[in-house]
Amino acid sequence: MGWVGRLFDPRDTLARLLLLDLSGVGYLVFGTQSGGSPTATQWLLAAVAFAVALVVHRRPLVNLVAQAALLAVAIQVVDDTTINQVGASYALLELAMWARRPGLIWLAAGLLAAIDLTDSIGDPFGRFLSGVFGLTVEVGLPLLLGLVIRTTRELGRQAEERAAEEQRRRESESRAARADERTAIARELHDVVAHHVASMVLRVGVARHVLTDLDPRVGEVFDDVHGTGTAALADLRRLVAVLRDPNGVRGDAALTAIEPSAVPAALGAAVDRARQAGVTVEADIDPAVGALDAVRGLAVLRLTQEALTNVAKHAGTSALARLTVSVVDGAVHWEVSDDGRGRVPAAVPSGGGHGLTGMRERVEVLGGQLAAGPTGAGWRVRTVLPATTPAPTAASLSPAGTPAQPPPRDRGTSVAPRAAEPA
């Protein structure tokens, strides 16, 4: 509605009527048609009209009837009826804007027109026509303006409803599309990935029991592969369940759940698994990680698992890795680095790996930034997961006194002479 809507806002009705009353007082004091002082009757009718307008400003129909009655009296007892005519016309304008039943508007307009015409009864025909023409200003103009404002307001309301409905429709279509995608992913995970993982776990278990005369070290490897595969299968099943019914998931950052108190033990298990693979891991884990929320706790665990796996792949099993996890003022400071020794080449799928990409996406969802890049002969990955504050800048993650490094590509495309990350 623009400026018209702001000018005729229903909350400002009292202010508009107060200004109209002040204008009427100014007219009586400075601008009566006769040029003389207004009579006591004029002042009395004007004062009553002013008071009624202010008292019933929230009831336009009552105001219209009262102003019309005062106009009818003024026509009979005073010569200058301007104050009462303006009051009745403005009452018609307010009624045209806010009446709930449009039929009342036309009845009120007819009533006001009939009262105005009583002033022309008995006059010569030419003067009577002049009175009829005067109705266009006294009745037609406020009626037209009120209907225009009313129609404009209704069109604006309908446009807002259509926009809201269109937004709801787009959101519904988007939710349906996401649900279809999640269902398709869940189906493929269940029918293909989970099936093959279950088959591998089963065969490793059978081999472990059939091959009884194994070297103990080989048996430990079998047990580790079997345990890892079983855990992966359980994660896959939870992931499939969440993909099919995501209502319980708190945002895209948590596709699976972990109890916060279990995070330190889970991190210890990830460190032990890396050590079993041959990597020397020095871990400094703040016990406060056990009090983190489930989403950030899961993120720390997944980041640690991915980073230590990358150390084994790219730095070799004889590398020295350092894991640091601390909680400072509610923010989680996480870092994994290695010395790069024992580097071994690893096969990389076409297009490079997706480990760093997935880690970066997980961190950014939680408001942080992932910094990864070479450090000496090795590699370092670190981030800060904020509590409730905005994500730290890249400069805060870079070494002191050095500019922040741009987001690196996967390890296979970095400047370090290390094989790219295959997974």
Image (cartoon, grey):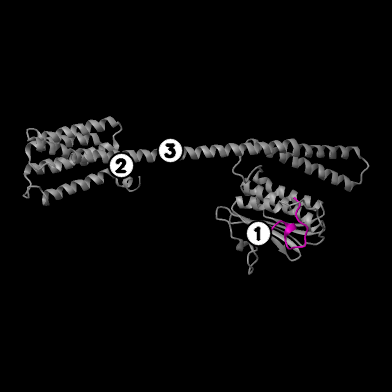
Three-letter amino acid code of the residue under disc 2: Pro
Q: For the residues marked 2 and 1, what is the alpha-carbon distance in whole angstroms?
A: 55 Å
Q: Quadrant of residue 17?
A: top left
Image location of residue 256, percent across then percent down: 66, 42
Query: Magenta stretch containing residue 387, yes or no?
Result: no
Circle 1 packing at 10 Å, graded few (<14), some (14-19), many (20+), is some
Residue assigned mark 2: 10
Q: What secondary structure is the magenta-colored segment mainly?
A: loop
Residue assigned mark 1: 407
Q: Is residue 336 visible?
A: yes
Establish if 204 lies above or below 344. Answer: above
Marks 3/2 in contact by CB < 8 Å: the verdict is: no
* 420 or 262, nearer to the observer: 420
Q: Which residues are magenta?
A: 406-423
Circle 3 packing at 10 Å, graded few (<14), some (14-19), many (20+), is few
Image location of residue 69, percent across then percent down: 15, 34
